[in-house]
Image: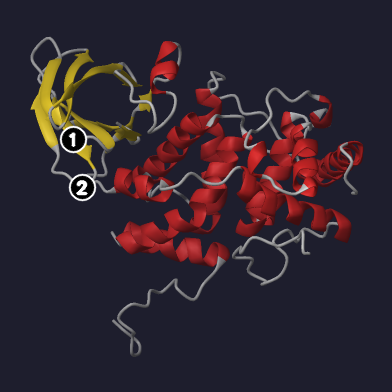
Amino acid sequence: MSNGPTITDSAPWSELTGHPRYAACLVAAREGDRRALDAIVVDLSPLVWYVARAQGLDHTVAEDVVQTVWLTLLRNLHAVAEPKALAGWLITTTRREAARHRGGADRVQPLADDAAEQLVSAEGLPEDEVLRSDRDRSLWRAFNRLPDRCKELLLLTVVAGRAEYDRVAQELNMRRGSIGPTRGRCIATLRGFLTSEGGTS
Amino acid sequence: MSPTESPSGNSPAGGHPVDLGLPEQDARLLAELAALLELADPVPDGMTDRIRFAMDLDNLEFEVARWQRDGELVGAAGVRGSVAPDTITFTVGDLTVMVSLAPATNGNRFDGWLVPGGPHTVEVRVEGHDPATATADEGGRFVLEEVPKGITQIVVHLAGQRARSVVTPTIVL
């Protein structure tokens, strides 16, 4: 079975990053390898957390959603059709579960809507106090003035960037062609707010 | 100073965490935002451990229940781990489980009620302890005299012709 010397602690995915790593972990997890499952949880929980937060959920409900998503994965290990699309599956499942908690049943709004930057933000994210520098505070305030869906698009860009955003974006029901322009407008709006908050953009 | 200290991502190219072909100044602003996010809205302490505990299940044939956190329940149970709730409720499909908690010598007494009732087995898992189990009576009532406090998950094994299990996300009691 082995095709060479194996270091006791090395796992087939340990040298991999990004989607090939998640895919290798998922395949091993299906065979009952708990370490593989652990590795996915460690790698991708921040992604799931920020996707839930980007849906406007408070900390308590966001963590409920995060755990529900992981439990849902656990019982569907064999049902995730394409292991390489795991990050995308997690994002989709998280947004769906978050929508359910917000009382919107299964209605998930598409992200890249032309009107995205015109909707008004319902609630800003807290923890203003931990930001020590003026620059951090200005940027955070500017970010929180953005409409919710702008915030979500930028948050996803930022957190999923580390999970290879390009592939992940395909998993969302975004109109691909409108993501770039919408994001551009959101960033421009952010910059405008940042200037008015006294920061340089 | 370096305002764009990039979070240590597993960026496969080893490059910028936000490499989407954006104009450089946009990419820089988003990288700054990424660093800020981890500062202003960090992933909760211990969340990964709680997820692992929740997933440490032998039988993978289960349905996931949802905690009900609306109405006054949010007031009671809203702040995870800081204010202990006195009633917790979860639902899945047509099943609702309510548990009222009362202080016991070493933890909490659970007085629970399952709807619809039946001789279902309720297993309470608390991290670092052996699971406590009770069987509900025909009316769906069950009692656990003493459940240790901590990271808690409830698993219900539903009696009936078709065996079903229901698990909750963890809650800190």
Horizontal and vertical percent position of residue B89 = 32, 19
- Identified at 72% across, 30% down, the residue is A148
User: Do tags 1 and 2 sit on the same chain?
Assistant: yes
Residue occupied by mark 2: B128
Give the chain letter at badge 2: B
Left or right relative to A173: residue B75: left
Left or right relative to B46: residue B103: left
Mark 1: few/some/many CA within 10 Å (<14, 14-19, 20+): many
Q: Is residue A14 above or below residue A95?
A: below
- Identified at 74% across, 56% down, the residue is B31
Distance in Å between CA atoms under marks 1 and 2 = 9 Å
Give the chain letter at badge 1: B
Q: Amino acid at mark 2?
A: Gly
**Quadrant holding the N terminus of chain B:** bottom right
- For numbered disc 2, what is the local secondary structure? loop
Dots 1, 2 in contact, CB < 8 A: yes
Horizontal and vertical percent position of residue B111 = 17, 17
Residue occupied by mark 1: B148
Q: Earlier in the sequence, mark 1 or mark 2?
A: 2
Q: Is residue B150 above or below residue A170?
A: above
Quarter residue A137 falls in? top right
